[in-house]
Image (spheres, grey):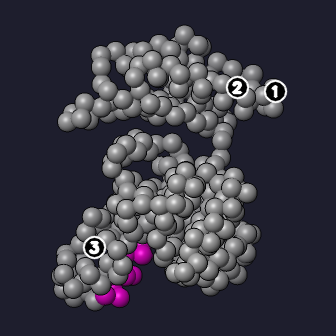
Amino acid sequence: MDSPVTLIALLYGPDKPGLVARVAGWIFERGGNILHADQHRDMEAGVFFQRVEWVPFFAEAMADKPSGAPDKMAQAAEEFCAFATTLGMQARVASSVHRPRVAIFVSRADHCFHDLVLRGKAGEFNGEFALVISNHDDLAGIARGYDLPFHHIPVAAKAKAAAEASQLELLKKHDIELVILARYMQVLSGEFLDGFARPVINIHHSFLPAFAGGRPYHQAHERGVKIIGATAHYATSDLDDGPIIQQDVAAVTHRHNVDDLVRKGRDLEKRVLAQAVRWHLDNRVLAYGRKTVVFD
């Protein structure tokens, strides 16, 4: 049986009595049927978070006239966001049939890139990998082998602004809604992030906030840690300081050298990045301030 067409809302705002009932009532009054609902309250901040997924009343009619589906979904999303405002909440609404177009940024390391693309071909992500952008040409042949357009844009220190302008032009041209930094070894400027104005997910090969910046496995080895980790987070203008989506760790001992840490870390990086991307594309991540709430 085909999955029903649904709307997914993520909303947050000051906690107050009756929010769950008000949201459920709004959906019920418009003929919708809630499939999933989850909520969380930040006890310290007094903030309420909710993810709710429902089948709108017009879902069955969409099967007969799919051409009108985007307009109806967009209208319903706009109406829900307006309703959320009356509750003092901020909201965003997505459709289950919308598959965001995604760009992958890479450098020379290929493990996360291979993993993402193969998972995408296996149907694990509710999105479409549309192009690959790199500051090196090492992975050009591999990307084209996957039938992915590859764009080599070198990034020199004195010409970084021009390189980022070219990147932004490509992202706009291909209507990219998400950028994944799959071990892209360049720091994105605040101007780039402001110009893109859409989410960017980065994988850092460390359990942040420990060992931020470069060569974290070497830093970890020198410190004699007993665990190493990987962190997927939303990129911000502050290096390796964006809201964390997913993390994982692996045990290490004094017997492991730096190469051992790198090898174990690569496995972590692949799993952590894939999970973060999956949650994001399934509309399960709500970022606020320096944190995220993940409705897994």
In the rendered image, the quadrant that contains the N terminus is top right
Residue type (three-letter) at the residue carrying disc 2 = Lys
**10 Å neighbourhood of mark 3: few (<14), some, or many (≥20)?**
some
Q: Position of residue 216 (x, y in %)?
A: 32, 78
Residue type (three-letter) at the residue carrying disc 3 = Phe
Query: In the current view of this chain or complex, which residue is farthest to the front?
Result: 158
Q: Which residue is mark 2?
A: 72
Element type where label 3 sits in the image: loop
Q: Is residue 280 magenta?
A: no
Please name which of the two marks, 1 or 2, marks the residue nearer to the observer.
2
Please name which of the two marks, 1 or 3, marks the residue nearer to the observer.
3
Q: Are marks 1 and 2 in contact (CB under 8 Å)?
A: no
Task: Please determine whether, in this image, residue 27 is positioned above or below residue 148.
Answer: above
Query: What is the CA distance from the residue labelled 1 to the residue labelled 2?
Result: 11 Å
Report if residue 216 is visible in the image.
Answer: yes
The residue under the point 34% across, 45% down is 289
Q: Are marks 1 and 3 in contact (CB under 8 Å)?
A: no
The residue under the point 68% across, 55% down is 172
Q: Earlier in the sequence, mark 1 or mark 3?
A: 1
Q: Is residue 260 magenta?
A: yes
Q: Please tell me the numbered disc located at residue 211.
A: 3
Camera-nearest residue between 169 and 131: 169
Q: Which residue is mark 1?
A: 65
